[in-house]
Amino acid sequence: MNPYETFSSVVSAVNGVLWGWPMIVLLVGTHLFLTLRLRFPQRHILRAIRLSVTRDEGAAGDVSQFAALVTSLAATIGTGNIVGVATAIALGGPGAVLWCWVTGVLGMATKYAEGLLAVKYRQQTSDGKMLGGPMYALERGLGWRWAAVLFCVFTALAAFGIGNMVQSNAISMLVNETYGVPHYVSGLAVALCTALVVLFGIRGIARFCTAFVPLMALLYVVGCIYILLLNASYVWPAIRLICVSAFTPSAAGGGFVGTTIMVTARYGIARGLFSNESGMGSAPIMAAAAQTKNPVRQALVSSTGTFWDTVVICALTGIVLVSSILMHPDIDYTNGAALTKMAFEKIPLVGAPLLAFGIVTFAFSTILGWSYYGERALEYLSGKRVIVFYRLMFIGVVFVGSIVQLSLVWDLADLMNALMAIPNLLSLLLLSGVVVSETKKYMEI
């Protein structure tokens, strides 16, 4: 076994431990605990959506609440919504879709709490910028400077995995398979485009995301709805199979191979976290920069990110893919990319281009959003002196990600997700009293 294979095996083994029952209990348990203790903040979703498009004039912050939301969505609406869901189905069976969706519904409470603490404990720099996120909640709320440092280290590393290599890899593979463009050519092109936006900082990233994220999400949702209309007779059987397989995988059928409940739950929850990042601690870094009157208003806006990302988009993707497999039971559903491509090719003329546009723009916007997360983490660790070097290194890794093996990239992404989530989830549980207090104080304002 060569060093590359050895390293890949070690990463996979560590993931098997981290994503065992302890992580699943901690993640889902935190979602459920906050949902109950905050008395189902999900019920405020309509108000939250309204606030997301309402500007808080005169409030302190770097960007509007809407810009903060779409920039955080840019980092979450990515390959996790398309290739990630297909991968969950391939590895965990159709039941993984339900676990992914449940992670999203309950995760709205966690995203709410993250956004609230991000604004509550944020601080303003000498040049007027707002800095916040789990590292500040850990340090200022709990006095755990050591945990804040660990979180930032994991975040900086995750920025190169989940937010960079996974995305550029997805772009290069798609462009190569669809148009025959060599991986290194598309890698260079994406790296150049990344440089043109990232070097302008948060305002440049926010401007790009505000313009493109709503458009690309709308086009993707419309495409999914069209496919579901074509698959109409298989939609309800697909939903039923998803629900049954989540708890009795042996009853998968329809061309699916049964898996254990543990495997199904693991891949569904892992891909749910990868998609919406609730509990991972990344999105609150962006929420801290929002212009908002009080922590609760931004917390509500933040919760809509998980709603759109997982409750809507991932659910649509999962039903599209499972119904397509039932319609074509002979298809090799273990190839996530091929499965997704087959489903979207049902749309006449524009199906394949729509999928290509969706993956490329989703992945590229995720790269931009995560570049900001990693930058803020490094600024917390060592100040501004490393920012230019970090940006250049981040751009270089975009190219590297386009030519490496996908399986290792996904495993590294899962590993970094878990390492980020642990200190963040602990802070959410221990500071839940602060979240409740702030909610009572500001909810009606």
Image (spheres, rainbow, N blue to C red):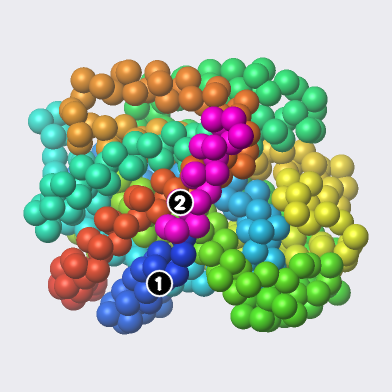
Q: Secondary structure at mark 1?
A: helix
Q: How many marks?
A: 2
Q: Residue at x 61, y 22 (%)?
A: 187
Out of 202 and 401, give the one closest to the viewer: 401
Is 53 displayed left or right of 294 in the figure? right
Task: Decide whether residue 199 is among the magenta residues.
Answer: no
Above/below status of 416 relative to 186: below
* Residue 124 % position (x, y): 13, 40
* Residue 399 % position (x, y): 55, 22
Above/below status of 382 relative to 255: above
Residue neighbourhood size for the residue with mark 2, other residues' Cα within 10 Å, grouped as few (<14), some (14–19), many (≥20): some
What residue is shown with label 2? 14
Q: Which residues are magenta?
A: 1-18
Q: CA distance from mark 1 to mark 2?
A: 17 Å
What residue is shown with label 1? 25
Task: Decide whether residue 13 is among the magenta residues.
Answer: yes
Is 68 displayed left or right of 79 in the figure? left
Q: Residue at x 90, y 60 (%)?
A: 330
Q: Residue at x 61, y 68 (%)?
A: 264
